[in-house]
Image (spheres, coloured by chain):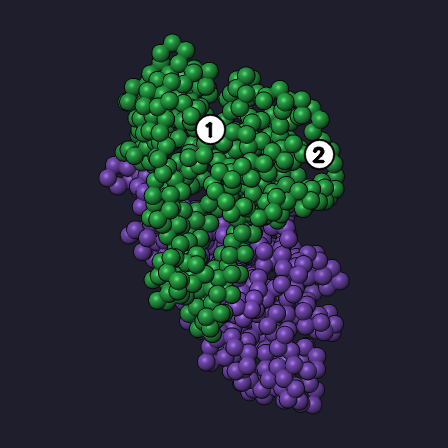
Amino acid sequence: MTETIASETGARPDYRSMPDDEFRAALREWLATNHPGRRPKGSNDERIAWHKAWLATLFDAGFAGPSWPREYGGMDLDFGKQVIWQEEYARARVPGPLGTGLGIAAPTIIQYGTQEQKERFLAPMLRGDSVWAQGYSEPGAGSDLQALRTTARRDGEEYVVNGQKVWNSSADIADVIFTLVRTGTQESRQNGISYLLVDAHAPGVTVRPLRDLTGDAHFTEIFYEDVRVPVANRIGEENGGWTCVRTSLGHERAAGAMNQAAMYRRVLDELVELARERGLTADPLVRNALADLEIRVRLMRYAGMRTISDIEAKGEPGPASSTTRLFNVIFEQDLHEVAVDLLGEYGALGRNDPNAVQRGRWVWGFLRTRASTIGAGTAEIQRNTIAEQVLGLPRDPAMPPR
Amino acid sequence: MNLTFTEEQEELRASVRRFLTDKADSAAVRRWAESDEGYDAALWQQMAGQLGLQGLAVPEEFGGAGYGLVELGIVLEEMGRTLLPAPFFGSVLLAGQALLHAGDEESRARWLPGIAGGTLTATVAISEEQGGSALESIATTATRADAGWSLSGTKMFVVDGASADLVLVVARADDGLGLFAVEGNAAGVTRTRLDALDMTRRLGRVELADAPAQRISGDGDATELVQRVLDLAVVGLAHEQVGGAAKCLETAVEYAKIRVQFDRPIGSFQAIKHKCADLLLRVESARSAAYSAAWAAAEDLDGLPVAAALAGSYCSEAYTHAAKENIQIHGGIGYTWEHDAHLYLKRAKSSELLFGTPGRHRARLADLVGI
């Protein structure tokens, strides 16, 4: 597998020296020509196969991994072209990545992995040949991730892993689970954590769907029972996993800063249309609520523009980007609450009721976005981070040191 | 749209900040606010002569530097940070922009050089006794007279209305709304200073009884022009609001770092941290709102009404919130007359109420974007 990709990567076209407008046109045309069409209705397996086929097509054409080094199958684009890539990719409405490896694990491996690990893991992840899921949170370690208790005991050239992870998305379809484990004492906190790549198909790994308050199972729980993981699958030093956790690749996330704004622009237009259909746009209270959302969806876009142009002009994203995520999660909660309120009693119907408006999408969104201020760092933790790291306020002396 | 400043613009900001930090500390601001004139004439002259601030957005042919709303916005933001009491907002932004956009060559040539040079102060009078900036209810009348026009009616909440050398008055003529120039000391003009909530910005009442005037908006209804002047006023105000809100946040953060209670700085408590983080979110979003509105004013006048309504709504609420939280974070000291926190609260609240409330701005935005 690795050899095939290596020989193909040599032939991949290089877009780095292409003028920006030509690159945009080439990518746009390629995406239009190769668009995989609608997601097939069939079984989950069929949908995954369809999704993987798309990622392989993208990779083989040299259009995957805009920020990644070329030697691992990426495009190594400058920031300006990364922004173009993000814009065109979102515009084309083609499937995104499978799993959560690309944005989270890959930068860690690129920065801290050995040459052997980079060659072994990166290209298959980017091509969609292997799907990655994150194993960080535990029932007893959420915001306080440094308290995690899943253990990895060294046994020769292997670790023996025991414990439980939770809130893992895509773990049910994953091939690799990038997992934080305790290799030091429980009291060692962040100084006793290691970063392991666990084969999701290994004996002793059990993945169970976790039903959330929406009634769906978007997340899973993972149980490790004497799972043997080769030491060669450890990224970074033993007990040095914590420093690897928050790695990002340049400003790759900022390059997509406009995408969420563009997505919510569409959603808000649909909400306004809903209000109009239901004859509510003459109500001053409704108009006020919708105007407030209109203001914020525009500000979301402007913040993205400022972040991007700050990076281009100064090399750093500036303070506006530090509050972007908090701004956006509050916005998406508020938007769905306005929507549910608009529906009146219809907002009290579940999505399976035949009378549910637009198949209950707004009510479902209201429920789903409860997770927005919890997952990937609660809003409270985000506020602490903003206060301490951007505004320089003192650490809480009752909190353990970081 | 470009929302990042050029190096030259950053230098402008730095030099205005240096100037105001040196010259306009809290004691000076209070002294000028309480003086008869309401500002420091020597400083005003330095601003015009040394820094050229009054003429920044005045075309070169009228003695200015020929820049636009983005640069003027930078200056207003810095003045908002210091609460500088000066006729800058009324004279330079309101009247200067009104004269520019009215398009009357004679009145431009007559008054813009004085505004740019800091030798003439001016303002714009729109609101009347019933309050609000609803143009359809303007009742001040303009009738044709021998050498121009004659105005009668009462204007309220006029920024620097009791002191400006020149008042540009919105009045109703037989062919619709018009913009008229009235000299402050003309016969038939009676002016009273109002006791304004905001010590650092003067408001006046201007009574006109057959006051002689010149029409500067040309023949025909000038509602569109007056609306544009209102929009530009809101954009200018939004920059002041960003400056004031950012200053409130900085002051609160600095205090939270040094104020010790329960043997620890209060800024180490999450209750305070979260307030400050939320303030940063609002301040940064307010920046996006104000800067995008300045860009529209400079580059995309068709987009100005929406941009102004957006900025007017968001920046007004952000500033008032920041001013209130600043007092709350300061606790008792923030409630004293001695501390400047109340000056910011009063500036914030009154700015929120001049030229349209946030709710009115949102109602207008809803109309404009077709909700």
For the residue marked with disc 2, what is the amino acid? Tyr
Mark pair 1, 2: CA separation: 31 Å
Left or right side of A364 for B1: right
Rendered colour, chain B: purple
Q: Is residue B35 visible?
A: no
In depth, the one of A19 and B56 nearer the eye is A19
Secondary structure beneath label 1: loop
In depth, the one of A67 and B299 nearer the eye is A67
Q: Is residue A147 visible?
A: yes
Q: Is residue B81 above or below residue B166?
A: above
Residue under the point 44% across and 68% down: A286
Rendered colour, chain A: green
Residue under the point 40% across and 47% down: A372
Identify the disc placed on residue A15: 2
Q: Position of residue B201 (x, y in %)?
A: 48, 64
In depth, the one of A295 and A234 nearer the eye is A234
For the residue marked with disc 1, what is the amino acid? Asp
Q: Chain of mark 1?
A: A
Q: Position of residue B227 (x, y in %)?
A: 59, 72
Residue topped by disc 1: A175
Q: In the image, which is nearer the foreground, mark 1 or mark 2?
A: 1
Q: Chain of mark 2?
A: A
Tag 2 or tag 1, which sits nearer the N-term?
2
